[in-house]
Image: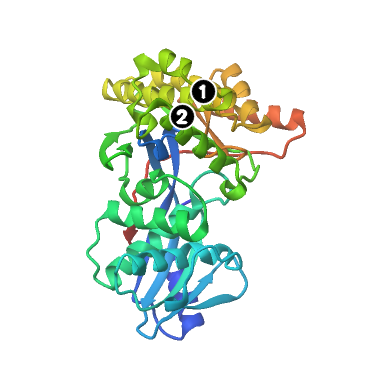
Amino acid sequence: MSVTGEAARRDVTGAFEALYGTAPQGVWAAPGRVNLIGEYTDFNDGFVMPLALPHTAVAAVSRRDDGLLRLHSADVEGGVVLDVAALAPLRGDLGWAAYPAGVVWALRAAGHPVTGADIHLASTVPTGAGLSSSAALEVVCALALNDLFGLGLSRPELAVLAQRAENAFVGVPCGVMDQMASACAIEGHALFLDTRDLSYRQVPFDLAAQGLRLLVVDTRVKHALGDGAYAERRAGCEAGARALGVRSLREVPYVQLPESLARLSEESVRRYVRHVVSDNHRVERTIALLDAVDAAAVGPVLTEGHASLRDDLRVSCAELDLVVEAANAAGALGARMTGGGFGGSAIVLVTEERAESVAAAVEKAFAGAGFAAPGIFPAVPSAGARRV
């Protein structure tokens, strides 16, 4: 559900007043995202196509001028008080507070005069579900501070600073897709993003008009990108680019993929390169189909992408594979895992008339396998970060 309505604004405002003794100077919201196609391509200068979800992180914020950063979350007991001048990367004791603190650090490191803030956060973005709960926290704080301190930064600039917070301060080597989706998406559209230069196009994504629905299936298997597996794959992609003599795998043409793979001696690097180059091509195929108003034909591309993530990148898990298998067997047009993998969520493209039966088939398959019941909800293309 969305938490950006009037009731939610009142809730975070009331909590802020109770915590800090005064009303906030404003309330901002930033969404989580689901990625339609293009996985592990963003740190390879490639193409991605995410869309913002109605699930959001909301922040009530006031600026401070005394160098203190006071942080509180509706989901965690107690608060955190930090000295902005003493913020340093890779502090393992900050937990969730590392994300907003990292944004303040990144802004100050870039020369922006952020002198402190009081922040109260609430979020409905599921954590560990591959739906970018961390990016939502980063972007909502970045936008609020941008407004309160009059920094004049653009949405892409805020996204890059939020990514730097996650990379350098928190220590997760993510690409920029999540932050760009949260900062720049608009309602009713998918974001076709070129991560090499951050150029993007808003692509109309009205599935209902074509009698379709995109379901998100949260497997309830928590994933964590900081555990080394993500970093290992990123390092493997970078090794492949070096071996091929290119700056990034984006520069490897799809038509030259077989001969490029033949030049790579390490088996895992070959698999990673094959996935990234082919997934860039899948994004291009998807954008062509959406431009042709043929979203149903995207289904097989999704399933093909899942096979690549499962077999070449090897970032799937039994629950994600079961979503894809059960959904497709029940008549879905296509399905794939989305996000960093090792748990998290999958997406299922389905006709309106089969949406309920496909969802029921996935739930039945999970019960039969002894897995926890998944969470299933429609992906509604929603607005990006905004003041509410």
Question: Relative to 9, does residue 18 appear above or below in the rendering?
Answer: below
Residue drawn at point x = 41 percent, y = 40 percent? 43
Question: Relative to 92, does residue 260 appear above or below in the rendering?
Answer: above
Give the amino acid at mark 1: Arg
Question: Relative to 276, does residue 5 appear above or below in the rendering?
Answer: below
Q: Which residue is mark 2?
A: 240
Q: Nearer the viewer, residue 352 or 165?
A: 165
Residue drawn at point x = 69 percent, y = 27 percent? 365
Could you give the CA–CA distance between mark 2 and mark 1, rounded to whole angstroms? 7 Å
Q: Nearer the viewer, residue 339 or 8?
A: 339
Q: Secondary structure at mark 1?
A: helix
Residue drawn at point x = 64 percent, y = 43 percent? 220
Residue 51 image point, x, y percent:
38, 40
Total marks shown come to: 2
Q: Which residue is mark 1?
A: 270
Q: Nearer the viewer, residue 108 or 240?
A: 240
